Amino acid sequence: MIFILLAVVDATFFNSQIQSFLPKRYDHILWLNLIFGQPHIWASASLYFDKHYFQHYKTQLISTSIFVILFLLITRFTLPNSFWALGISLTLIHTLGQQYGVSYLIGGVKKNTFLTSRWIGYLSLILLTCTLYITRDPNNLGIIRYIIILLILTQIVFTLYELKAFSTVGKLFHQMNLAMTVSSSLLFLAGYPVFALLVLRIIHDTTAFAIYSKHNATRNKQFFNNFALRPLLKSATPAWVATVLVGVFLAAPATLWDLIYINMFITYWHYAMESFAWKRPSLLRTNMGSFVP
């Protein structure tokens, strides 16, 4: 909510001067991109720096890599005008999918309730961001603006109604998801895309790091199975610190040198692997244990 407050203060007291100095995308701010964005993706890749995992997932790792390369080549040259809009849509599906997936995992909610919430969130943010990508102007959205507002109101009403189906922890997490999608949509509409993207990035990346850290702590509790984490864990570094440091270290070269094709490959590879790697009864889920202590 701090970004909503900043936007209100800027518009009310500073005549939107802060808005005029902000870049259109958070990844144009180098130090932020070294923390949010690529590091959690590389942290997920580092999970397979475990000999047992690599042997178990070898076929999926290779086939996913080939699929992603072909996907990028085909879409880049056959859909040049839609390539980035497609990337935005896939990113939002992945981002919201993780958040609502964790709600489903810890919330004790019925599947149809979970699916409805997820697809309202998908529809509102994908419609909004793709329209903004085309128009480049939040003041030129036309009827899309009213559709987005209607979707936001629908999601608020639906979430308030469905919260009774959640466990206590699930309610808190689902409320956070609602706040994330609503605040991001409002910030996009108000012309603060970098704030909107940061809301999504911070919540999504923090959740991802929490999942990977919980897994790494459990998996490497008795034996240091992951050779990327081994030096840090041997020195009694907490698993969450080791996980973040490895992610930042691996992401730094491609981020600092702006190696766009490497970043695109690892990003789409991450989306593809995460779509199935954590589903029961996978080794990752089994070795993570319970997400909620």
Image: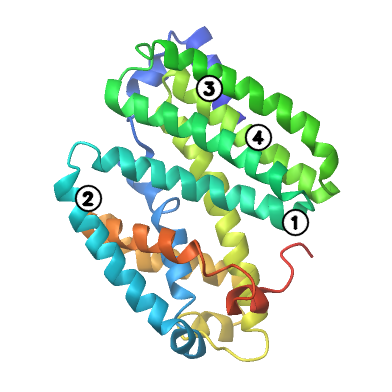
The residues bearing labels 1 and 3 have C-alpha atoms spaced at a distance of 27 Å
Q: Earlier in the sequence, mark 1 or mark 2?
A: 2
21 on left or right of 259: right
Amino acid, disc 3:
Leu
Amino acid, disc 1:
Ile
- Judge the density around disc 1: few (<14), some (14-19), many (≥20) Cα neighbours within 10 Å: many
Expressed as whole percent of the image width and height from the top left, the position of residue 289 reads: 71, 74
Query: Circle 1 — which element?
Result: helix
Quarter holding the C terminus is bottom right
122 on left or right of 161: left
Seen at 48% across and 50% down, the residue is 94
| Applied colour scheme | rainbow
What's the mark number on residue 186? 3
Expressed as whole percent of the image width and height from the top left, the position of residue 73 reads: 18, 57
Q: Earlier in the sequence, mark 3 or mark 2?
A: 2
What's the mark number on residue 106? 1
The residues bearing labels 1 and 4 have C-alpha atoms spaced at a distance of 16 Å
Q: Which residue is under mark 4?
A: 178
Q: Residue furthest front?
A: 112
Expressed as whole percent of the image width and height from the top left, the position of residue 10 reads: 49, 15
Q: Are marks 4 and 3 in contact (CB under 8 Å)?
A: no
Image quadrant assignment for residue 285: bottom right
The residues bearing labels 3 and 2 have C-alpha atoms spaced at a distance of 31 Å
Image quadrant assignment for residue 131: top left
Query: Circle 2 — which element?
Result: helix
Quarter holding the N terminus is top right
Q: Earlier in the sequence, mark 2 or mark 4?
A: 2
